Image: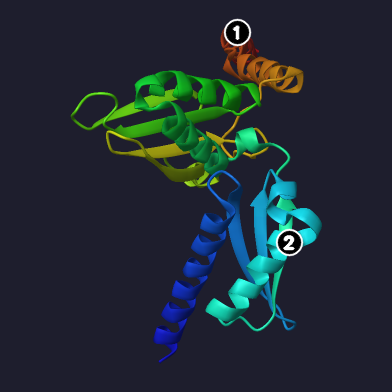
Amino acid sequence: MEERKSVALKKEEFAVKEYVKTSLGKGKASKVEIEYTPVGEKIIVSTHKPGLVIGRKGERIGELTEFLKKEFKLANPHVEIKEITEPELDAQLMADEIALGLERVGPLKFKVIAYRALETIMKAGALGAELKLSGKLPSTRAKTWRFAQGYLKKAGESAKLVDRAQAVAMTKPGVVGIKVAILSPYVKLTDKVVIDEAMINKLKENMKLKDVSLKPKKKKSTRKKATKKVEEAKK
């Protein structure tokens, strides 16, 4: 019974998140998080356009809360807006922007759109980025195109720090799938080595100690001991 309840709760959360994203529109919201408090449900919407999401005097927020109460039967939903100051480093927003560009212009100029998006990401200070576009671009057969630049972790614990997102563009030739991966400059990598003056001085000290330890030790001459023994014997 508990498993069924947890599955039903996760399905309801997914439905709420998808509805919030679709109601606000593509490219408006990056992430939707739900927190349960004693007062009610807190729905946090991350966006780089808070004015468009809130609406005039909070009209859109009011409509959204009323719909969530009726359709999803939430007791006391409270919608909060979290502003994204650097949308160029958000994978979901960039994926949605590429999708909107393909829908607006068409898949023929997909390389221009992809390279432009990659350039904006790298100019924002990202350590690395990767874009994957799969679909009829522009031939009749579906194909995957990859655009990458910089340093991007693919395996290990550091790979979990990469921001990944997906989007879909509905074009005339067919559906185009978009995958975006961005490694933010604010992420702390555990295997990153910074070579500065302190590191260089430390390496020099270690090399000096190593050279001293490797120097051959002077052997004590055994001739003096032998002559002393012979003289003592003669006496």
Q: How is the image coloured?
A: rainbow
| Circle on res. 41 | none
- Quadrant of residue 178 within the rendered picture: top left
**Amino acid of disc 2:** Glu
Image quarter in which the N terminus is found: bottom left
- Residues 220 and 26: in front is 26
Q: Residue at x 22, y 32 (%)?
A: 142
- Residues 104 and 97: in front is 104
Q: Inspect this view and state whether residue 72 appears.
A: no
Image quarter in which the C terminus is found: top right
Residue 196 image point, x, y percent: 72, 20
Residue 226 image point, x, y percent: 57, 11
Taking 195 as reference, is 152 above or below it?
Answer: below
Find numbered disc 1 in the image and state the secondary structure of the residue it sits on.
helix
**Marker count (numbered):** 2
Residue 14 image point, x, y percent: 48, 67
Q: Residue at x 59, y 32 (%)?
A: 192
- Outermost left residue: 141
| Circle on res. 227 | 1
Return the disc, 1 or 2, that comes first in the chain's sequence.
2
Judge depth for marks 1 and 2 and give the one in front. 2
- Residues 157 and 176: in front is 176
**Amino acid of disc 1:** Thr
The crowding category of the residue bearing disc 2, from other C-alpha atoms within 10 Å (few below 14, some 14 to 19, many at least 20), is few
- Outermost right residue: 57
Residue position for label 2? 59
Q: Residue at x 64, y 40 (%)?
A: 188
